[in-house]
Image (cartoon, rainbow, N blue to C red):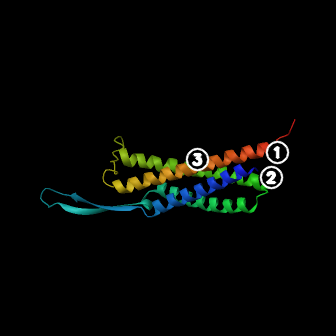
Amino acid sequence: MSAKVSICESILRVLALLLTLAAAIVIGVNKQTEFLPIQFSPAFPVVDVAFKAKWHYLSALVYLMVANIAASAYAAISTLIVLATRTAEIGVAQTIIIFDVTVVGLLFSANGAALAVGIIGYKGNSHLQWNKVCNVFDNFCDRIAISIVMSLVASFAFIGLVALAVLSLQKRFAPRS
């Protein structure tokens, strides 16, 4: 592997590690409490009721959190493996590529699930009578959006790693004519 490809791979792995770790942290600390006025009947006074939004209330956000933690752990381990084995054998390189592709799929599926839930929270669904909630829990929704964007950028970093590895393997092991 050339020095340029090795440096680029190291940068992409560290970038993916930092982004997935940051996305998991942003989700993990995300919560918001709002007090909304509710009147049960015209005869009763208006009462302020506390409503909470937490990341673990939605299974799609739990999935996003777990996927980012798994991707972050894998990025840390694979970075150490890549740095430790500068003269990579074909078996190690192929295993890393397989896991990189798996992490890409994991992150994109988690991002898609969280984005779908986020859009429903932002716009609601009038056909099902689901009201939008991002107008009430605006900070909560903003942090989830930030986390999804960081996770998507990390997904593209992993795609870059797959592309680099495949090109490197193709150059190294392709039959020469």
Residue at label 3? 156
Secondary structure found at label 1 = helix
Cα distance in 3D space between marks 2 and 3: 24 Å
Residue at 72% x, 45% y is 166
Compared to 36, does 116 lie above or below?
A: above
Q: Earlier in the sequence, mark 2 or mark 3?
A: 2
Q: Is residue 173 left or right of residue 118?
A: right
Residues under numbered marks 2 and 3 in contact, where contact means CB atoms less than 8 Å apart: no
Q: Nearer the viewer, residue 115 or 100?
A: 100
Residue 8 versus residue 66 in the image, above or below? above
Q: Amino acid at mark 1?
A: Phe
For the question of whether residue 98 can be seen, the reply is yes
- What label does residue 90 carry, if any? 2
Q: Amino acid at mark 3?
A: Phe
Give me the C-alpha separation between circle 1 and circle 3.
25 Å
Residue 60 position within the rendered picture, expressed as x and y whole percent measured from the top left = 48, 54
User: For this view, does 162 lie left or right of residue 151?
Assistant: right
Q: Nearer the viewer, residue 93 or 66?
A: 93
Residue 4 is tagged as none
Q: How dense is the environment of label 2, judged by Cα within 10 Å: few (below 14), some, or many (20 and up)?
A: few
The reply to whether callout 1 and callout 3 are in contact (CB within 8 Å) is: no
Q: Name the residue rendered at 63%, 54% in the picture.
A: 11
Location of residue 72 in the rendering, given as x and y in whole percent from the top left corner: 59, 60
Outermost front residue? 3
Q: Which mark is residue 173?
A: 1
Dot 2 or dot 1: first in sequence order is 2
Q: Secondary structure at mark 3?
A: helix
* Circles 2 and 1: CB atoms closer than 8 Å: yes
Q: Is residue 154 above or below residue 81?
A: above
